[in-house]
Amino acid sequence: MSAGVNRQRMQALVAAERDSYIARNPESARLAAEAGKNLLFGVPMHWMNDWSTPFPLTVREASGARFRDADGHEYVDFCLGDTGAMFGHAPQPVAQAIARQAKRGYTAMLPSEDAGPVAAELARRFGLPCWQFALSASDANRFVLRWLRAATGRSKVLVFNGCYHGTVDDVFVDLVDGVPTQRDSLLGQVHALTDHTVVVEFNDLPALEAALQQGDIACLLAEPVMTNVGMVLPQPDYWEAAQQLIKRHGALLVIDETHTISSGPGGYVRAHGMMPDALVIGKPIGGGIPCAAYGFTEELARRVEQAKRSAPPGHSGIGTTLSANMFAMAAMRANLEQVMTEPAYHHMFALAAQLAQGLRDVIARHGLPWCVTQIGARTEFQFTDQPPRNGSEAHAVMDFELEQAIHLYLLNRGLLITPFHNMLLVCPSTTAQDVARLLSAFDDFLADTIQKQIC
Ligand SMILES: Cc1ncc(COP(=O)(O)O)c(C=O)c1O
């Protein structure tokens, strides 16, 4: 698929951009080579090699909407740690709270004074009264699935095709030609995931109903807007009907707000009046400090407590030693009370709207069949003029070569967007000038690569 760009021209441009990256970043190159001697694949996480760059960029420091690399270049960050730093890097209130906590202990396997206020604030925001904590959204999702299977006595989990909820084995089941299929890229996976995972397309109510009718689904684990296969919005009224179906068939709804917290202080659920039985939130909840939280309705909390009480004594398989540590709780409290505020969101919404409209204008000016989707502070452009309705459609329009070309071009001009698909976040310290700079560079890229009509 050409997506409206001239491939030959783009490949030549990428070759020049790679040379430029290498020339521009000698210190990052040196550090990558040095660190690589003792790191598997040369990086601390194997996927850090998956960026568009010939070798990883080394970050020296990050603050607000900006970071500086080891060669001293400054970047405007629209990736923001793929949501981990959605409220800016090192927000002051979080920095102060963890500096305070640094002298008062980190972990004790006992609750700190911040536990109650953090849980109360989460309850107020999301409308769910009972909370627990984890160190990552992946962990939180895993734990919620355990609790809900135990509480319902049902073994199966339902997910949407193309979803991602972290490294949760249960969700790595795709629809391949309509057949649920375990993802073949998974390493060391020995369990038959399709035995206990059912997968349907997003926005397909008959498929959802057919799955629920079997009566063995414990819960649907879903993002309210799919964000990890590009962005896929729910059709109007989809969630209202889906929630009714889930309830009617005795299943539970778990909403993963880890990315869609871009929708507002109470996430997509509060902004759109959804009533999940459980909610998961990770990444930015502690300002970038590793932590996550999950909440239950009163009714589900009682069922979950009953499941634990009636189980034999011993390990539940839920929780880790450092979960809910004092450090993480202090970070979450400061972040919730002082950073993830209404005024912060107002600023982010206004700028993201400016960014989304600016992208649409640039795309239209170049006559490309691409679309732009915005969910609060989160914006995505996709290589199709019809916004995808489900994971299969979204996956079909992904174009890795083109994405990487755009990412590298922007990076060489001091602008970072997410390394996978085309997501851009704005944070409370992103400015209108930053957005204008991004739009201008995007415009230049398209001018350099679009298909020229042959007369
Ligand atoms: C929706 C969603 N949930 C959960 C996760 C997992 O987060 P983490 O990698 O911090 O565990 C991700 C990661 O991208 C995500 O996109």
Image: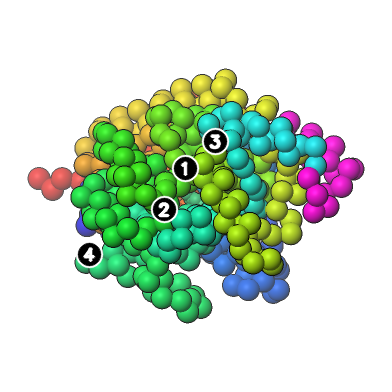
Q: Is residue 115 left or right of residue 228?
A: right
Pointer 3 or 2: first along the chain:
3
Residue 98 in the magenta stretch? The answer is: yes
Q: Identify the element where label 2 is drawn.
A: strand
What residue do we see at 27% from left, 34% from top?
237
Does the CB distance between marks 2 and 1 fall below 8 Å?
Answer: yes
In this view of the protein, which residue sits in the foreground, 50 or 197? 197
Q: CA distance from mark 4 to mark 2?
A: 21 Å
Label 4 Cα neighbours within 10 Å, binned few <14 / some 14-19 / many ≥20: few
| Residue at x 30%, y 67% (from the top left corner) | 180
Residue receiving disc 4: 178
Q: Quadrant of the N terminus?
A: bottom left
304 shown above or below 352: below
The region drawn magenta spans 93-111
Pointer 1 with pointer 3, Cβ within 8 A: no
Q: Residue at x 69, y 60 (%)?
A: 320
Bin the neighbour count of mark 1 within 10 Å (Cα to Cα): few under 14, some 14-19, many 20 and up.
many
Asked if disc 3 and disc 2 are in contact, CB closer than 8 Å, the reply is: no
Q: Nearest the camera: 413 or 272? A: 272
Three-letter amino acid code at the position of disc 4: Gly
Q: CA distance from mark 2 to mark 1?
A: 9 Å
Q: Is there a contact, CB below 8 Å, between mark 4 and mark 1? A: no
For marks 3 and 4 on the same chain, the one whose residue lies earlier in the sequence: 3
In what element is the residue under mark 3?
loop
Which of the two labelled residues, at mark 4 and mark 2, occupies the earlier sequence position?
4
Q: Is residue 329 left or right of residue 301?
A: right
Residue 277's disc is 1
Q: Position of residue 7 (x, y in %)?
A: 27, 57
